[in-house]
C-alpha cells in the first residue's frame, strides 16, 4: 500500500513510518521540513507541506492509505480564544484533509487523537484541547463518505525516541536523572505505551480496521514517581523520588493561568481544574484494543532505557499527538 503519513517526522508518526516500512508498504511523509538526522529509507519519500495551510490535494497522488499523526496538543498556548484555536487545528482542518483524501481516491485511513476524553469524559466541557479531541473524531468520521475507511487511534502517553528539539517531559527527565539534583514527582499517575507498540497498533488498524473503529491504546498504568524512578534506574542513579505536595501543584497552576490571561493567552487546559485532575490516578485497561490489534506490551522499561541511553536532545516523551 502507498501510505501518506501526515506528521511523519513527529514521535508517533515516525515510528508509524518505520513500522510501515517493516511491513513492506511504500511511505510518503508530509511535513514542514524533512528530518535532518537520518537518511530516508528507499521505501520513504518526503513532500514538503503544512497541513494547517492551503490545499494539499497534490500530496495524495497515488496514495491508497493515510495516517494523520499530527494535531495540536495542549502545550500550545494561543493568543486569544483557545476554544477557537483548538477547534480549527484539531477538528476542522483534519476533517477537511480526510475529505480531500477521499476525493483523491484514498481508501483507508487512521486518525490519531488522544485518550483523555475516553477515560475521563467529565473533562470535555472544561478543557478546549480535550473538547477538540472528542469532537474531532465525530467530525472526521462524518466527513468521510463511503470511499474512505477511517479508524480512530486513542493513545495514552507515549515513550520513545524522536527528533523533537523542544523541551519535553522525557528530555527533562533524562537531564534530571543525569544531574545531582534531588528527584521530585507529582502525585497520581496514568497509562503509558511504547512508541513502537503504538506504531504496531496504528499500522494494523490501517490494514484491517473498519470504518468507525475506535481503539484505546495503552500498556502499563504507572505512578509519576515510579516513572521518574525508572528513568533514574536506567541512568544508573539510586535514591528516592519525593512526592510534590498537591497544594503546591494547585497553587502553581492557578498562578500560571492568571499570568497567561494577563498576557492575553489561553491554555488548552483550564489549569486550576486540570491540576486537581492530574494529581489523581488516570488508569484504564488497554486489553480490549490489544487483543484486537495484537500490539506488543511490556515495552515501557525497554523504551525508557533507549531514551536515557541516547543523546538527550533526541529523547521525546509527550502526550497524545501528538
Image: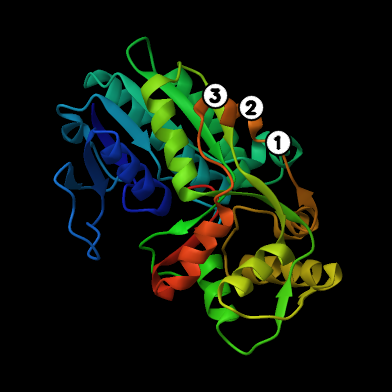
Residue 133 badge: none
Q: Position of residue 97 (x, y in %)?
A: 33, 31
Q: Is residue 55 left or right of residue 180?
A: left
Real-space CA distance between mark 1 and mark 3, rounded to the nearest whole angstrom: 14 Å
How many other residues sit within 10 Å of disc 1, few (<14), some (14-19) or many (≥20)?
A: some
Q: Which residue is mark 2?
A: 288
Real-space CA distance between mark 2 and mark 3, rounded to the nearest whole angstrom: 7 Å
Real-space CA distance between mark 2 and mark 1, rounded to the nearest whole angstrom: 8 Å
The answer to whether residue 303 is seen in the rendering is: yes
Q: Position of residue 76 (x, y in %)?
A: 50, 58
Q: Position of residue 8 (x, y in %)?
A: 32, 47
State the residue in front, 137 or 256.
137
Q: Is residue 243 above or below residue 50?
A: below
Q: Which residue is mark 1?
A: 285
Quadrant location of residue 100? Answer: top left
Q: Position of residue 38 (x, y in %)?
A: 22, 61
How many other residues sit within 10 Å of disc 2, few (<14), some (14-19) or many (≥20)?
A: few
Q: Secondary structure at mark 2?
A: helix
Residue at 59% over, 58% down? 266
Q: Are marks 2 and 3 in contact (CB under 8 Å)?
A: yes
Q: Secondary structure at mark 3?
A: helix
Q: Is residue 296 left or right of residue 275?
A: left
Q: Which residue is mark 3?
A: 292
Quadrant location of residue 125? Answer: top right
Q: Is residue 105 above or below residue 278?
A: above
Q: Are marks 2 and 1 in contact (CB under 8 Å)?
A: yes
Q: Is residue 194 above or below residue 121?
A: below
Q: Are marks 1 and 3 in contact (CB under 8 Å)?
A: no
Amino acid at each position: 500500500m502507498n501510505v501518506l503519513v501526515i506528521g511523519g517526522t513527529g514521535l508517533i508518526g515516525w515510528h508509524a513510518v518505520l513500522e510501515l516500512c517493516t511491513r513492506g508498504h511504500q511511505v510518503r511523509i508530509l511535513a514542514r521540513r524533512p528530518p535532518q538526522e537520518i537518511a530516508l529509507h528507499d521505501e520513504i519519500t518526503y513532500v514538503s507541506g503544512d497541513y494547517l495551510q492551503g490545499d494539499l490535494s497534490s500530496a495524495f497522488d497515488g496514495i491508497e492509505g493515510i495516517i494523520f499523526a499530527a494535531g495540536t496538543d495542549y502545550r500550545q498556548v494561543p493568543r486569544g480564544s483557545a476554544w477557537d484555536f483548538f477547534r480549527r487545528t484539531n477538528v476542522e482542518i483534519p476533517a477537511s484533509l480526510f475529505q480531500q483524501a477521499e476525493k483523491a481516491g484514498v481508501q483507508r485511513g487512521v486518525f490519531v487523537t488522544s485518550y483523555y476524553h475516553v477515560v475521563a469524559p467529565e473533562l470535555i466541557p472544561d478543557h478546549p484541547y480535550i473538547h477538540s479531541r472528542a469532537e474531532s473524531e465525530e467530525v472526521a468520521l462524518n466527513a468521510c463518505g463511503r470511499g474512505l475507511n477511517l479508524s480512530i487511534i486513542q493513545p495514552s502517553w507515549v515513550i520513545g525516541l524522536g527528533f523533537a528539539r523542544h523541551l519535553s517531559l522525557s528530555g527533562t527527565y533524562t537531564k534530571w536523572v543525569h544531574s545531582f539534583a534531588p528527584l521530585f514527582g507529582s502525585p497520581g499517575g496514568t497509562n503509558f505505551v511504547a512508541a513502537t507498540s503504538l506504531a504496531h497498533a496504528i499500522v494494523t488498524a490501517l490494514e484491517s480496521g473498519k470504518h468507525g473503529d475506535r481503539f484505546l491504546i495503552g500498556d502499563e498504568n504507572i505512578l509519576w514517581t515510579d516513572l521518574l524512578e525508572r528513568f533514574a534506574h536506567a541512568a544508573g542513579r539510586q535514591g528516592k523520588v519525593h512526592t510534590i505536595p498537591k497544594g503546591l501543584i494547585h497553587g502553581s497552576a492557578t498562578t500560571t493561568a492568571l499570568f497567561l490571561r494577563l498576557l492575553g493567552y489561553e491554555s488548552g487546559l483550564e489549569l486550576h481544574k486540570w491540576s486537581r485532575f492530574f494529581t489523581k490516578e488516570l488508569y484504564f485497561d488497554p486489553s480490549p484494543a490489544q487483543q484486537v490489534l495484537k500490539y506488543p506490551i511490556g515495552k515501557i522499561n525497554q523504551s525508557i532505557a533507549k531514551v536515557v541511553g541516547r543523546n538527550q536532545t533526541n529523547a521525546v516523551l509527550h502526550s497524545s499527538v501528538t
